[in-house]
Amino acid sequence: MGEDLKHWVRVPVGPEAARWATRGRCRRVLLVVHNVTAATRLIDVLPLFRDDLRLQVLATCTGSSPFRSGVAELLASVGVPVLPWEQALSTPVDLAIAASFGGQLNQLKGTLTILSHGVGYNKTLTAPNTEHRTPDAVFGLGPEWILTAEGAPIADAMVFSHPEQIDRLAKSCPEALPTAVLAGDPCFDRILAARHHRDRYRRALGVHPGQRLVLLNSTWNPTSLFGDSGPEDVLPLLLPRLTSELPADEYRVAAVLHPNIWHGHGPGQIRLWLDRARRAGLALVDPLEGWRQALIAADVVLGDFGSVSYYAAACGTPVLLGATDPEALGTESPVAAFVRSAPRLDPYRALPPQLDRLLSEHRPANGPTELTSSAPGESAALLRGLFYRLIGITEPAAPAVLDPLPLPPYEPPLRTAPLLVLTSTAADGTITVRRFAEPRYEPDDARGEAGAGGHLAVHEDTLDPGVLESADIILRYGEPDDPRFGSPGEWAAEVLDRYRSASLAAYITGPRECEVLHRGGLRCGLTSDSAGDPAVHASALLARLHTGPEVTAPVPTTLTVATGTHLARVRVTVDREAAREAHREGTGRAARPGR
């Protein structure tokens, strides 16, 4: 014990705290963390104590969860004193708040409130050190979780977001019914409050006009979409098809994985597992700060029986289930009812028709929207009122509000996987472009139109450099004045000289602009009237000109480029001086570097 005491916090609590603490008369609020997942709900409610000089917030970790990785880093980022668990058990507090079960919660010296860390209480789970479980026992509602050995409720207040949860509590553990408090869902309220920023979140993820955002989501259960213990392991079938079957400029694909997947297997391992998908354009969303924004931005969610899929349905977003596990859910829970009726993914059928049908037939279900919270938008006021009553002091005069969701960083897709580019030209000159990242097969309609053609576009930093030897277009994204490449013109001349099969080099300098150099000497800038991936316009220009080593068609002043339902008008600005210089040299090699 003496060795343990060396690690105990001395300020602002501890035997000597009165001597060292600057504000030593504060009431104490203790955040009891089990794992990163539960901590996120505590962080949701932490702003309810803002601007109150009467309170000192502390934190501790029970050490009872198998998912301990990431907790220390998260608590360090919160910046409140973190007490070792043994010290937390011996330190009197005015209010302790937990968002899960486990550890000796009944031994805490203070009033205890327990929140749900998901969308209510839905999953079944056997309590540790419990040989038997009540039939259909739901985690957080069964007596093995919420009563002491003597049969008394562990918590002074259990927070629920909807009366149906309290009705199930009355059936499963009537002894705890007096502790039930209806106070909404702060996580859902933060989603509702941020929905008007949907376009910003889509732009942050690099979603362009006309694109659909498909959000892949998985909970952590072994039978989840990401798991490998279900009837069939869907993930190896699904991942390559998400990026090879869905045209890159018609779909943006992102993934939100449960924090227990991240911290159970390690973020580095997750990135290794998803490396090919990420090179093909998959965005891997931060499971703490970014998942709600991605959910708001999504056009469709490809998920399972976890809370995120249910939150999506509550927002009216179409959900296609790739994994279901009836035994993982309480049969009377709203999530179980949703899973029983939601559309199913067929992993052996083509994805685009399934997504088209889902979107065309989707009608938002009333259940998830109504049952997620009976007090939408009111959780901040309800929870702060509860917390301050338990602490025993008056609430601040300012309104109770939660933090707004932060704007995620701009992360456009960077596809370094080879792209099969299919083009066709309509009678009016409109060039339709469809790009597929490392497709396993050529789409059935690839050659069905007159004037259709195809070529290979490859990023210079592709994983397999040998692919560059057969590329028709070589791509790079960067700042126009990056000294490492000299200039876009110098870079383009260099790669065309090195890779003799390529007809065009395109240096993308922004979401609307790129500079291209043709092997025949044509150098020009492409500027679109809308944001997107200008590499598409380089492919359209190549299709308009030719596919051989010489320019065989007049250089247009504008291009009309179609990707899915989106039309872009692209201005073509020819560098006439470079063209004349190339003509004087009379060579098939690329024009001399520089502009």
Image (cartoon, helix red, strand yellow):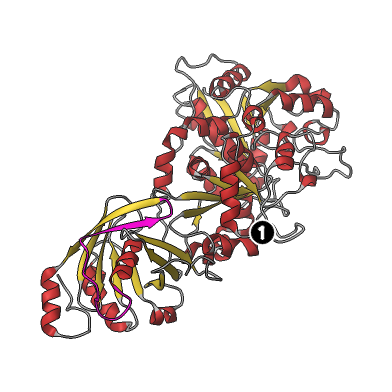
The quadrant of the picture occupied by the C terminus is bottom left
Residue drawn at the location 33% of the way across and 79% of the way down? 502
In the image, residue 237 sits, relative to residue 186, either above or below, namely: below
Left-right relation of 517 to 148: left
Specify the farthest residue to the right: 132
Q: Position of residue 575 (x, y in %)?
A: 15, 67
State the extent of the magenta-drawn residues as a range. 546-565
Q: Position of residue 174 (x, y in %)?
A: 83, 23
Query: In the depicted view, which residue is nearer to us: 207 or 40?
Result: 207
Residue drawn at the location 64% of the way across and 30% of the way down? 366
Q: Position of residue 432 (x, y in %)?
A: 38, 60
The quadrant of the picture occupied by the N terminus is top right
Looking at the rendered structure, the kind of residue marked 1 is Pro
In the image, residue 475 sits, relative to residue 155, either above or below, namely: below
Please say whether residue 559 is one of the residues in the magenta stretch. Answer: yes
Q: Which residue is mark 1?
A: 347
In the image, residue 142 sits, relative to residue 580, either above or below, namely: above
Query: In the depicted view, which residue is nearer to us: 392 or 124?
Result: 124
Query: In the depicted view, which residue is nearer to us: 501 or 283?
Result: 501
Image quarter for residue 332? Answer: top right
Q: Position of residue 76 (x, y in %)?
A: 50, 45
Image quarter for residue 88? Answer: top right
Left-right relation of 299 to 588: right
Residue drawn at the location 35% of the way across and 54% of the way down? 532
Q: Main secondary structure of the magenta part?
A: loop
Left-right relation of 218 to 410: right
Q: Secondary structure at mark 1?
A: loop
Please say whether residue 78 is one of the residues in the magenta stretch. Answer: no
Q: Give the mark count.
A: 1
Whether residue 348 is visible to the viewer of this picture, yes or no, is yes
Whether residue 84 is visible to the viewer of this picture, yes or no, is no
Q: Residues within 10 Å of mark 1 (few under 14, many from 20)?
A: some
